[in-house]
Amino acid sequence: MREGRDTVNGRQQTWVNVRVSGDGALSRRGFLRWLGAGSVGLAGLSWLDCLTLHAEELRKAQKACILLWMAGGPSQFETFDPKPGAETQGSTRAIPTAVPGISIAEHWKKVAGVTKNLAVIRSMTSKEGNHGRATYLLHTGYSPSGGVVHPGFGSIVASELGQADFDLPHFVSIQGESIGPSFLGVQYAPFVVTDPNRRPDNLAAPVPGERLQRRLGLLKELEAPFARAGAAEQVRDHQALYDQTAHMVLSPRVRAFDLAVEPDKVREAYGRTPFGQGCLMARRLIETGVTFVEVQSTGWDTHGAEVASLKKLIPPVDQGMAALVTDLQARGLLENTLVIWMGEFGRTPRINLTAGRDHFPKAFNVALAGCGVKGGQVIGATDKLGTEVIERPVLVQDLFCTFCQALGINPRRENQSNVGRPLKIVEGGHAVREVF
Amino acid sequence: MTIRPLLKYSSSAPFCALLIALFSNPARPAEPAPVVSKRPIEREVAQRLDVLLLAAHDKATSLPPLAEDEAFLRRVSLDLTGKLPSPSEAKTFAANADPDKRAKLIDRLLASEAYAVNWGRYWRDTLTYHTPASGNYLRWELFDHWLVEQVRRNRPWSEIVTALVTATGINDECAPVNYLTAQFGNPVEVAATTSRVFLGVQLQCAECHDAKTEPWKREQFHELVAFFGRAKIIQHKDVDKRGTPYAIEGREEGQYFMSDKKDPKHLIAMTPRFLTGETVSSDAPDSERRAALARLLTSPNNPWFARAYVNRMWTALMGWGFYPSVNDLGSNVNPLYPEALNLLAKEWIATGYDMRWLFRTLANTQVYQRHLQPRSESPSEVPLAVCPSRLRPEQIFDALVKALGFNENDKTIPAPAPSSAPAVARHTGLRHMIYQAFKIDPSLPAEEVQGTIPQALLMMNSVLVNTFIAARSKTFLAEALAKGMPDDQILTALYERTLARKPNAAEMAICRRYLKKVSNRAEALEDVYWSLVNSTEFLTKK
């Protein structure tokens, strides 16, 4: 591997020349032969494009975001707002963390070690207590309202910060589908990875690159008669999509999806769980230039037998999240990567008859790290029993303004919506200044 | 003035016309009250429609010729039944010398089960596409089956809408109630969807403020919402482990409140009032409120109801609409060919909202049967012909089944398992895989449908496509080669299977050249097959 500086199209660029070998299957000679075999398709793909990767330094200048999404609504009592001694707390104890004065729920032993990087907001409050509606709200910053389809935050960040010539998707969602781009357009749609332990579906071509190229050439030729028969526009769009897709399939960056190349030690550190490996893939993707990655953990809707469920739910997230923050920091990526831990709402202070907690949007918590977030602090508070926010209430709009500030996005920027009126990225709210 | 909710609008049309004249709303396009006459004949209306369109058409541009039989057969089969015609159907149709064969084909397709399934799915997706509801709130399969059944029975559109808007009961048992539960019984959302889909009136902006481009006031939206103000959503016990069901219960008390714009804490109780001015007493129980709403929605005097449906179906079949969006028949948009739209709406009302009647009429027009035309840059210069549009997800799935020759339930082909939350687990297996990749909101204008990278990846690289285009095992190509079929015969068969047509001379020449260039014959034929399945044409209704 060779590093250096080069001038490409009159522009100074930091680059890393990676010789892909072994399982990488692409050598310079092979690449040139492959280019020669099919003269059409893959417009603009060059040797330099293919093998010049942004160096870490360049990568670091671009802000990115990782959302750790706890689907179902995690209990604040059993995560970052325990109420030791209160009748509402149940049997889960509180443990001290690396930051004196901050305690969190037991089972979060590894996260307790990285609290110096975390800002915990204990005073989130909303009105949406239904999974569908609240998931939508915490993903878009808006409550659903018939007709206007709001883009997910991942798509917004991708459209604001994603680099135009990047050949992987700007937004990747691991183990869940997230919320789509709506009117921002399909180029900002989440690319869904169902299982981080294997390559995403259909990413690898089943035929050698040379033959794929040949097929694409034939396809292009065979499309011409249909284009002349009244579908020129459709054929042009389809061709552009196929060029872009082939570009991605053949891009060396797709190796970011391949966890097998990581040393065992690193994989163990994140935990050999789907969530842990998802966090590792998120780090690899961010490192390679992806703008937004969501990693989902499901099962937080603990209406019954809560303690037993949480014992299984928490450890993979604890390990994955702590490893992610540590690793991002060690690689100098945390500075420009916002990490968000949250779910759609909190859970009731009252423990129900089946030893679980029900939906509670009135008070819940969120944890943030990186990208200028001042760690080692708690913002806002609930009362002794955890039934009310008593200090510094934070609305979902405030939270989204905070994300925007961290990422350097103007929350009042307007996009043209699907119903023909402009829509702000965030309507109302103010960034929580204590976060920074 | 208050109308007693039990008033029967259908039997008192003159009275209604008077009322509407009295409460004339500026947003309402002027339209005379319909005269109930004898049932209009589809092909006569189709002819009158073509005459009207020709009269309004720019004479300078020449009209495209009628589409060839194979193109028409593919188009009408996809539109009415969602399926590609088989090579043998195409052969029979081409050989048929009956001058009336197109009309007869239309009748046959409309009588098929595939027609009911295709349009039931269209409505299922239209009504549920945007909801973030889980399977608890939306019993998707039940709702799907119910809609298919309504189309199969050719229930009048007015009755279907009435059933949806007035349903009460548990969503496990009462299928149409899923229309409300899928929107969490939230009156604001249900009212916005009802107005958007059934009337083509975009009111949701008026939820928060007076609409800027429309004459709607904020109050008017919330008065419409008040019709749903006593329909309450209730959680039920999960007795059979299918997930907690939800019910809509009609209440006799309670009001829907709008928050004061200046002082959001101040709540104002809203009296149900329809967009054309008719009200229902604020004491009326839920059943009366929603029954009155259904009558007002489906009244022949409602200026939007028939036009919204006609515009929607026209758009689905032609690839362009009288209005640019099926969701917005706004007063600030002038429709194209208004005489044609008025004629269709008037005659369709006279049939009593007969869905098959409208399909039969549209499919029998010359405008539907002409050669494909590109969508013009300027929206006012629409060609009097069909423009290309993307097939809907299950039409693509069925086309793939036919083109590739696989079994829908083939478990040897990997397909990602559906994830449960927040979306409803809709299909399973291979159908799910294609549905998930290609799903689109049927209300989206054809020119706004964009392809996605996962779609392209699936078609390019999936095990499904690459297994069945291969010249190995028991695939079509393997058998054709084993039988010793000559190249030209195989190439023709590949075109027929995938695109439901024969290749033309130019296409044959490209393929032959390719075969010559690639020394491995089986590989070259696989590549042709792959290219046809991956083509724009395969995904396009033309």
Image (tube, rainbow, N blue to C red):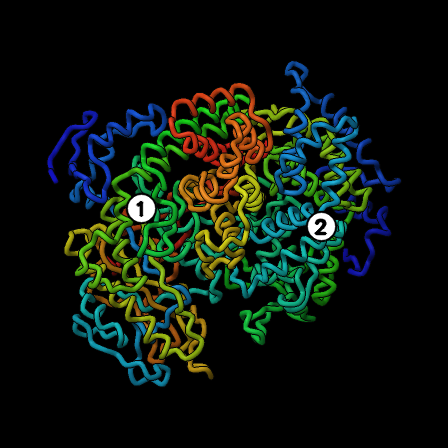
Label 1 sits on a secondary structure element that is loop
In the image, residue B526 lies at what x, y percent? 44, 34
Viewer-side label of 1, 2:
2
The N terminus of chain B, quarter of image: bottom right
Q: Residues within 10 Å of mark 2 (few under 14, many from 20)?
A: many
In the image: residue B232, left or right of residue B9: left
Q: What residue is drawn where x is 47% and y is 39%? A: B469
Label 1, on which residue? A409
Which subunit holds the residue at mark 1?
A
Amino acid found under the numbered disc labelled 1: Ile
Q: What residue is drawn where x is 51% and y is 22%? A: B508
Q: Residues within 10 Å of mark 1 (few under 14, many from 20)?
A: some
Which subunit holds the residue at mark 2?
B
Label 2 sits on a secondary structure element that is helix
Q: What residue is drawn where x is 65% and y is 62%? A: B177
> Dividing the picture into quarters, in which one does residue B319 lie?
top right
Please report contact status of discs 1 and 2: CB closer than 8 Å, yes or no.
no
Amino acid found under the numbered disc labelled 2: Val
Label 2, on which residue? B151
**In the image shown, does B449 or A77 lie closer to the viewer?**
B449
Vertical side of B78 occupied by A111: above or below: below
In the image, residue A107 lies at what x, y percent? 27, 75
**In the image shown, does A391 or B201 lie closer to the viewer?**
B201
> Dividing the picture into quarters, in which one does residue A369 lie?
bottom left
Instruction: Tally the marks.
Output: 2
Checking the image for residue B62, the label placed there is none
Q: Is residue A176 visible?
A: yes
Q: What residue is drawn where x is 65% and y is 61%? A: B228
Vertical side of B54 occupied by A67: above or below: below
The C terminus of chain B, quarter of image: top right
